[in-house]
Structures are given as structure tokens and as C-alpha cells.
Amino acid sequence: MPQHHTVTGTLSYPDAKSSFPAFPKVGFGSAVAIGIGAGFIGAFAMGGTNWLEQFITHRPASYVPARTIGNHFHVTPDFYDRHIDLLNNIHHHGMGMIAGAVRGVLSYYGIIGPFASFMHTGIRIMMDQVVENTAGTSALPWTWPINEQVIDTLHKGFYALVTGYLCDHCIRGVNWFN
């Protein structure tokens, strides 16, 4: 949207070239529901990139998400041992859906595009860290080895791009590639 700067402030106005819709195509509740669905798909895509990265790098799987769920819900050690992968997936998809709802709200209010997805990457990492640190299963990210910081940020960034594109397309009707 073009802007004109004056002494009294900045004025933004739509022009003929602007493809930014002024209003969302759906209501607020639908935007949240779309965000939840987009977050699930984004978490599924993030799991795929995680699998591919581990296949290439031979990095072992992290079970911090499973321990987080186990600690928060007081899961018995026997259940934890038998269903560790299930607990990992519950955490990834559950947090993806919750963060997806946040991205749906951002899109509803017009905070869209790749930059919004960049911001959403930080939101997603912050949400994970709050849950993991309150469970006592993780350290603060800046204390991690650098390679783990890079890997986690890239996976969460891919999640945020997929989720953001779906939210922006379904809620605002915005196609990033048009």
C-alpha cells in the first residue's frame, strides 16, 4: 500500500496496483478455525522437514516434546516408555494448532505475508519454550549448541511459512506468489 509522509503523520492509501484486500473474507471465529487447521498442516510439514533433515544429518530424534507432555500431564513412566513417539506428535501438532490460531488472528487483522511469518516463527519458538521450561525439560535457547539453534529455527520457520501462507490465502485471499 503506498504511503505519503506529511508533517502531521503518514497516510496510507490503496491504489489500483494494490492486491491487499481491505477486509478479511471470513469472520473472526472462522479465521481462528482456519488458523488451527493451517497450524496442523504446518506441524505436519515441519515433521516432514524434520524427518528429511534427520535422514541427511543422522541427528537423533529429540524427545524433549514427549517429556514436556509427560511432565505436564503426570504421565506414568510405563506409558511414557511405550508411547514416546505418540507424545512427541501430540506436542508438535498441539502446539502447532495453538500457534496456528494466533497466525489466523494475525491474518484476520491484516498482519500478512512472509514478514508476518517471520514474526510468527519467533512466536512459535517462544510458545514451545514457555511450555518446555515450565515443565523443566529444556534450557533457554541461547544456551543450546549453535547447530541446535539453527535446526530448531529452520524447522519452526518452515512451519510458520506453511501456516502463514495457508492463513493468508484462506482468510484474506492473498496469494504470495501472484
Image: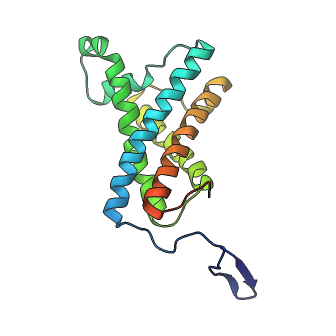
Task: Give residue 17's quadrant in the image.
Answer: bottom right
50 and 128: which is toward the camera:
50
Task: Please say if 145 is above or below 125.
Answer: above
Indicate the position of residue 167 as horizontal and vertical percent values. 46, 54
Task: Give residue 175's quadrant in the image.
Answer: bottom right
Is residue 94 rendered to the left or right of residue 159?
left
Image quarter hosting the C terminus: bottom right
Q: How many marks?
A: 0
Task: Please say if 3 is above or below 111.
Answer: below
Indicate the position of residue 67 as horizontal and vertical percent values. 37, 22
Residue under the point 52% across and 71% down:
21
Is residue 87 rendered to the left or right of residue 172?
left
The answer to whether residue 134 shows anywhere in this view is: no
The answer to whether residue 118 shows anywhere in this view is: yes
Residue under the point 51% across and 50% down:
164
Residue under the point 54% across and 28% down:
49
Indicate the position of residue 63 as horizontal and vertical percent values. 43, 19
Image quarter hosting the N terminus: bottom right
